[in-house]
Amino acid sequence: MDVTLMLNKRELAYWCVVNDRKLYLLDNAIPLLEESELIFNTDSARVIGEYLDHPVYWLEASDCSHNDDFYTQRELLGIDQTLFDLAGRATQLSHMLHTQGFCSVCGGAAVLAGDQFAMVCQQCSNAQYPRVSPCIIVAVRKNDQILLAQHPRHKTGIYTVIAGFVEAGETLEQCVAREVEEETGIQVHNIRYFSSQPWAFPSNIMMAFLADYESGELRPDYEELSDAIWAKATELPAIAPKGTIARVLIDETLDLIKGTKHI
């Protein structure tokens, strides 16, 4: 992608304006505006993609007088996935800008490169690219039940599937098996890749798997979870919202249980 494209001030564009990991929204949406209609200085705008034949820009908000109009990306759950992911790209690039300001080699100050999405050291010219943390997320099936977990961080009390960060020297499948056993006490098999989703909270890539119960008794790790249950399709608690890879996994597993899909 050419990040140096000149801004056409009269062209309609989507504006992913970021301040403190939040996005500027108008009527709960990414604004589609001409540059002249935007209330922010656009000198630092970078094109990050295209959506419906309109360019999509990332812009850091230097004027913070409109804080009430900034929201977390979660407010956009349910919009078209392409635009959601582009908004996530903007917040991930903003995260890079604010957390990778010093070189990991020599400690010198780093600035955003003009021709690529990287922080370049002003002393040794080392380039640091956005740090993206790999995570697995997995739906586990046991006959006509799905494994669901409740996390303390979910203030609404929703239930979701098991997730965790990949450790050094670990395959994705090993991570799936380890995370499930550590958090719930059970062992799984028939682990298979399903899909993925960039997840800008703050800068992750979620790699989704399906797995089947093998053995063990459900024993939640209460340092990680508030609860863990086996749930039938007819007895589901409140679950992860649409727009999340967790919800896609849950829906896929329920379809498999109902016999409407086969693998």
Image (cartoon, rainbow, N blue to C red):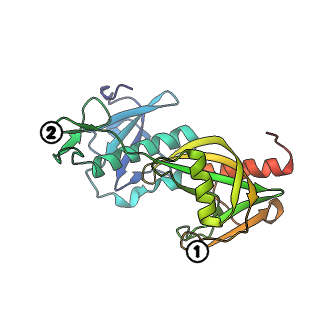
Disc 1 to disc 2, C-alpha distance: 46 Å
Q: Percent x, y for residue 92?
A: 40, 46
Mark 1, Cα crowd under 10 Å, few <14 / some 14-19 / many 20+, is: few
Regarding residue 2, the answer to whether it shows in the image is yes
Q: Percent x, y for residue 255?
A: 80, 48
Q: Between residues 147 and 79, which one lies in front from this camera angle?
A: 147
Mark 1 or 2: in front is: 1
Q: Between residues 26 and 113, which one lies in front from this camera angle?
A: 113
Q: Amino acid at mark 1?
A: Tyr
Q: Which mark is drawn over residue 181? A: none
Mark 2, Cα crowd under 10 Å, few <14 / some 14-19 / many 20+, is: some
Q: Which residue is mark 1?
A: 222
Residue at the extreme left: 123
214 over 172 or under it: above or below: below
**Residue shown at 35% from the left, 50% from the top:** 95
Residue 182, by quadrant, is bottom right
Q: Which residue is mark 2?
A: 122
* Quarter of the picture holding the N terminus: top left
Q: Amino acid at mark 2?
A: Gln
